[in-house]
Image (cartoon, grey):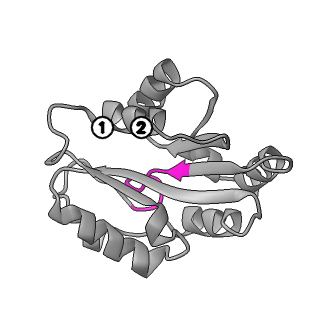
Amino acid sequence: MHFYNLIKDISKNEKVKLFVDMDGVIASYDFGKPLDFKNKRPLNSNIEVLRNVSKLGNVELNILSVCRENYQIDEKNDWLDKYAPFFKKENRYILSKETISNMSSSSMKSDFLKNINTKDKMILLDDDIRVLRTVHDNINNIILFQDSELVD
């Protein structure tokens, strides 16, 4: 309920675009295993918190994730369809390093968020401190949360 209450308070008087990373936040991520996205274990307690957040009136829930190769975009979308279908297809932003080469995941996400044209409050939820630092250093007026905020 902690994260839900934070977002509920933030979105009480204004619209919010909440961007959520996948790997390590709603899907298990093991650095030592192959990147087989379709078989990732769902982090059910985190998914349930975000399912509840998705029901808040002023919150637009988005996925912002990175993969290495273009075919993995379909795998991630299939995974979302199966385990977290409340993330609407039109609100899924899965960036591929195959398409956007020579950029780190941190820079890719930061550039993407910097180019969002909105008057809504923006929030990023990610497990990677490098991503959070890069976004913090490059974007004003964004609220950042690490995945640990999902845990009560």
Q: Nearer the viewer, residue 47 or 105?
A: 105
Q: Are marks 1 and 2 in contact (CB under 8 Å)?
A: yes
**Residue 16 spot, x, y in % from top left:** 68, 49
Figure quadrant of the N terminus: bottom right
| Circle 1 or circle 2, nearest the eye | 1
Horizontal side of residue 25 vs 148, given as left or right = left
Q: Element type at marker 2?
A: loop
Decide: is 116 above or below 89: above
**Residue 150 spot, x, y in % from top left:** 62, 52
**Residue 97 spot, x, y in % from top left:** 19, 45
Checking the image for residue 53, the label placed there is none
Residue at horizontal 17%, vertical 59%?
Answer: 70
Decide: is 44 above or below 114: below
Gap between marks 1 and 2, in whole Å?
10 Å
- Which residue position is annotated with label 2? 128
Give neighbour class at mark 1: few <14, some 14-19, many 20+ (Cα, 10 Å).
many
Give neighbour class at mark 2: few <14, some 14-19, many 20+ (Cα, 10 Å).
some
Residue bounds of the magenta highlight: 19-27
Q: The disc labelled 1 sits on which kind of residue?
A: Ser
Q: Is residue 10 magenta?
A: no
**Residue 64 spot, x, y in % from top left:** 42, 51
- Which residue position is annotated with label 1? 105
